[in-house]
Amino acid sequence: MERRPNVLFIIADDHRHSALGVTGDPTVATPALDAIAAGGTTVLQTHIMGGLTDAVCAPSRAALLTGTNPIRALGEDGGPRQGDATYTTSPDLVVLPEAFRRGGYRTFFSGKWHNDTESFARSWDGADRIFMGGMSDHYRVPLHPFDPSGAYPQDAVYLGKLFSTEMFAEAAIRFLGEYDDERPFFAYVSFTAPHDPRTPPSPWDEMYDPSTIPLPPNFLPEHPFDNGELRGRDERLAAFPRSRHEVRTHIADYYGMISNMDHHIGGVLDALDGSGHRDDTIIVYVADHGLAVGQHGLMGKQNVYDHSIRIPLILSGPGIPVGTVTDSLHYNFDLFPTLCELAGIVIPDTVEGGSMLPSFHGARGRDTLYSFYKNVQRMVKDERWKYIAYSVPGDMARVQMFDLSSDPWEANDLADDPTHRERRAAMQRLLADWRARVGH
């Protein structure tokens, strides 16, 4: 019987889809991720659906892990239910590593788990350096040791002694170096980079000179209107109005975090090579959401512009075409059935995502995508057009529309252009139909 492929699943925090060499950024250096892409498939149009909380990473991760939309994944309120930092996935949903564990895989985890301890306990045979939370000082991450009982009490927390990225990568490297099992493995490495505080270690802290960093074409000192989230925590990371120098400094630090992470991903890939399992391992790189960092006058991810809802997705390994790029529309929770199909794992009945594999071979993906942020922003897009509706007190009728084929930076709002009146009405109907179906 042919051995099923291993899975090395790497997820980053706050990594925007465009901040990669392989996706066309001329400044940021990501040689390890670019090499994965060269040997596999890059899915350019992968999106999150959003969330009902400002901690967008929690619903995004819950959706990816359950293979469902984030409202179903976290429940109707979408908020934390276990302390202040973890979010409980709906208990009737099977999570991705749990499905692989049931299917005979040895499962291993290291890094950030922003969801509940109960689903964590169902998922993993082993783990090391577990961060049960949303964000922390990268040099003093509060960690849990693996607890097979699933209790994870606060009095067991200890502080990590290395920079977060190095620490989580080191745990994965140790797992791969010691792996000796007839079962295939499902290893999940969850970085907290490049999330703020953006404090890359030396020499990455000086890798990018802010004075030479190009500003994005859609840089603005301020967002042109109230989008319902202009003064949240993420937005207060830079002064108002945004200065060009301060945004360049933030971008330089952001790129330093990404390049440092890429370096340590390279170390994990070297360990995979050393284990002798590179050729029979599916490698996945994805992020939980993007980030503005000065685009549209915003700093955070609490919006539905592409810089925040589009994420990098790269896959390589058995069953994945080499050197392929697809621009078909997908959600991050389409990964669940995709990986199950590649590994011969039964897809749980609770999964609503659709496999990406046909689009890797030229088929089209979804016709439309939807996204939302709390109760203030709703979005629909197809392969060309994007429509955003805002529900902000005092400005309830505000909408935007962009032609992404000619305006990928979403800088030219066509919502009030009379030549596109019919297109606006059509997009409005699409959004209304979706909201009626999901109740949001």
Image (cartoon, rainbow, N blue to C red):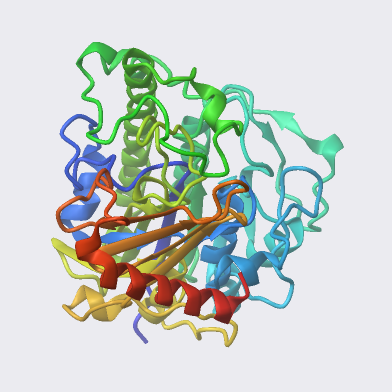
Q: Nearer the viewer, residue 28 or 190?
A: 28
Q: Nearer the viewer, residue 30 or 277?
A: 30
- Point out residue 256 in the picture as x, y percentages from the top left corner: 35, 24
Name the quarter where the C terminus is drawn: bottom right
Say if 170 sits above or below 222 in the image.
below
Q: For residue 320, say whether it is visible.
A: yes
Q: Is residue 126 left or right of residue 121?
A: left
Q: Is residue 124 left or right of residue 356?
A: right
- Point out residue 362 in the picture as x, y percentages from the top left corner: 16, 78
Q: Quadrant of residue 128?
A: top right
Q: Which residue shows up at 56% across the image and 81% down it?
A: 437
Q: Nearer the viewer, residue 233 or 89?
A: 233
Q: Is residue 307 left or right of residue 405?
A: right
Say if 403 sits above or below 27 in the image.
below
Q: Which residue shows up at 41% across the image and 70% down it?
A: 428
- Point out residue 295 in the picture as x, y percentages from the top left corner: 35, 35
- Point out residue 377 in the picture as x, y percentages from the top left corner: 52, 55
Name the quarter where the N terminus is drawn: bottom left
Task: Farthest residue to the front: give it.
Answer: 418
